Image (tube, grey):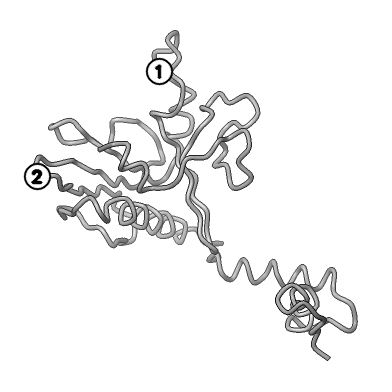
Amino acid sequence: KYQDFLDGLGWEVDMTTHPGYDGLLDRRCITTGRFSRYYSTATHEIMYHVVTLMPTKENDMQQIHKKRHVGNDHIQIVYCNDKKEFRPKTITSQFNDAHVVVYPLESGKYRIQIHKKEFMPPFGPLQDGMVIGPEMLGSLVRLTAFNASVARRSLHPDYIGPLPTRLARIRDIIQRYSSQETKTPAKYLASLFGKLTTGKDVSAK
């Protein structure tokens, strides 16, 4: 069940060849494990810090290399096989502002528990106490954790959403590299992608 849960969160990537966002995991020396879980869309990327995929050091009782990542995450996803309730203070940190906890049930469904600090804005779609089936578990947990992360970042006074940030980057590229003939966004993008989509030059005149 746990493996199926990981599969629902994102796909497995080899950190030695992964070209996308790395979540500050160690690509060079692979001290945080060779493989991790990753998910992306056209607008965002998610790299998970999966403790069970990180190597365990027998001579380190604290497993600092794992806590360095998990302890600094604002949002945590916890898969809890234990019948005891998860305690948010299991890992002491000034971060860990919200936890999405998943409890597998004997029925084959999953109970959801949401812990969040008082200052955290509301987020969803999953809410505390919900019970859901395995079909939508991974995608709903991923979306809830993502929205929790957005809610947490929105509290920063200088926060700018991903789409305005992307638009600013595109405008910056156009300003830097366009010519007099392609100085508007439409003309510049047409000059870049027109030939790719039609096979001929369709640059705006």
Tell which of 38 and 93 is nearer to you. Answer: 38
Secondary-structure class at tag 2:
loop
The quarter of the displayed image where residue 66 is located:
top left
Q: Residue furthest right?
A: 180
Residue 184 lies, in percent from the top left, at 78, 83
Question: At x 52% / y 53%, what residue is drawn?
Answer: 45
Crowding at label 1, few (<14), some or many (≥20) Cα neighbours within 10 Å?
Answer: few
Question: At x 34% / y 61%, what residue is drawn?
Answer: 121
- Residue underneath mark 1: 62
Q: On the rendered structure, is 177 left or right of 121?
A: right
Tell which of 166 and 18 is nearer to you. Answer: 18
- Is 29 rendered above or below residue 35? above
Crowding at label 2, few (<14), some or many (≥20) Cα neighbours within 10 Å?
Answer: few
Q: Give the quarter of the figure containing the N terminus.
A: top left
Three-letter amino acid code of the residue under disc 1: Gln
Residue 124 lies, in percent from the top left, at 30, 61
Residue 167 lies, in percent from the top left, at 64, 72
- Is 54 rendered above or below residue 145? above
Three-letter amino acid code of the residue under disc 2: Ser
The quarter of the displayed image where residue 95 is located:
top left
- Residue underneath mark 2: 107
- N-terminal-most mark, 1 or 2: 1
- In this rendering, which labeled residue sits more in front, label 1 or label 2? 2
Q: On the rendered structure, is 29 left or right of 182?
A: left
Tell which of 42 and 114 is nearer to you. Answer: 42
Q: On the rendered structure, is 180 left or right of 145?
A: right
